[in-house]
Amino acid sequence: MEVHFGSENLLILNVILAFMMFGVSLSLTGDDFRRVVQRPDAPIVGLLAQFVLLPAATCLTTWWFEVDAELALGMILVASCPGGSFSNIMTWLGRGNVAVSVSMTAVSSLAAMVMTPFNFSLYGWINPHTRPILTDIQLDSLEILMLVVLVLGLPLVIGMAVGKAFPAFARGAQKPMRYITLLVLLLFVGVAFGNNVDVFLATADRIVGLVVFQNLLALGLGAFAAGFTGLPRADRRAITMEVGIQNSGLGLAILFTFFPDESGMILIAAFWGVWHLVSGLVLAGIWSRRTARREAQAAEAAGSTHGNSRGEP
């Protein structure tokens, strides 16, 4: 089955991704990178889960369960992408450590310029079911690297420079840009789905389950890695979101550039772009309610203790 997506659509997608990265990086400063050096424990744990555990686990599970090669390779590509740019917002909504989330976003976006093409090529080759696709296409990792630099690296550098030169503009524009580009991206994905609804319906029984499973795997690996190393609750939440919210838009850009005929891979990445926002918002809501409940209980206990200390009944 053929996915209907022209070269003009690819240009629009790349522009959207670049603007999203630009909006995120407006608030980034050199301090965010220095913070990683000074207190590297949480970012390092998160980055290991992001670029080591998730791609390896995805490769092994798709191999073990003999997932269709095209769908498996799409899952490996999504797992090879960095954290999504809206993980910071999800972390904030879920009462997590936003500083850790921002630091991870900054470092993972830079690391992705090397790690995304490397992991995709490595684990796509390790899985014997997906290896023939890579062999037939003879993928050039350097070409993927250049694409990632253009849609992630360059906007990140420009955004940081603009944020430093015009701090008032950065403070005012950052959040509106994030929400606007999110809406535009969702609209873009919605239109793309609408143009290919017959292709999606024909494969939805497999795609939906695989995406939900992989997203739960990503969230679980992030939570496990952070919990295993004994990090504070707020840091654990940030890492969980950073690993569970993938930059599937980057995956789509890579797919439409290098794999335009692989409809299964494209639909995996496209559905990821919708589903991880749903799961992230649900998880953030649960965390927020739990924190509010604990704060209310603590305030009630403090009030009771204060009252007893004054001899009140």
Image (cartoon, grey):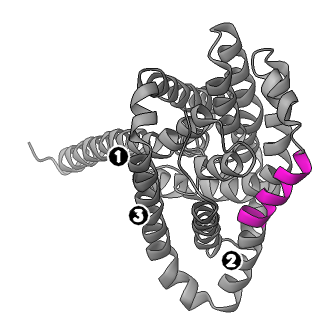
Inspect the magenta stretch and tell me whether residue 152 lies in it: yes
Amino acid type, residue under disc 2 in the picture: Gly
Residue 208 on image: x %, y %: 44, 27
Instruction: In this rendered view, identify the residue nearer to me: 218 or 71.
Output: 71
SS type, badge 2: helix
Contact between labelled residues 2 and 1, with CB atoms less than 8 Å apart: no
Residue that label 1 marks: 288
Residue 35 drawn above or below residue 134: below
Residue found farthest to the left: 313
Across and down, in percent, residue 16 comes to 57, 67
Mark 1–mark 2 distance (CA, rounded to whole Å): 30 Å
User: Foreground residue, 48 or 65?
Assistant: 65
Please name which of the two marks, 1 or 3, marks the residue nearer to the observer.
3
Residue 32: image location, x then y, percent: 72, 65
Q: Residue at x 52, y 82 (%)?
A: 171
Q: Mark 1 to mark 3: distance in Å?
A: 23 Å
Residue for point 72% across, 15% down: 60
Dot in front, 1 or 2: 2
Q: Residue 159, which numbered label?
A: 2
Please state the total of marks drawn on the protein image. 3
Q: Earlier in the sequence, mark 3 or mark 2?
A: 2
Callout 3: 10 Å neighbours few (<14), some, many (20+)?
A: few
Percent x, y for residue 195? 42, 49
Tell me how far mark 3 sits from mark 2, CA to CA.
Answer: 20 Å
Q: Magenta stretch containing residue 161, yes or no?
A: no
Q: Nearer the viewer, residue 113 or 170?
A: 113
Highlighted range, magenta: 141-153
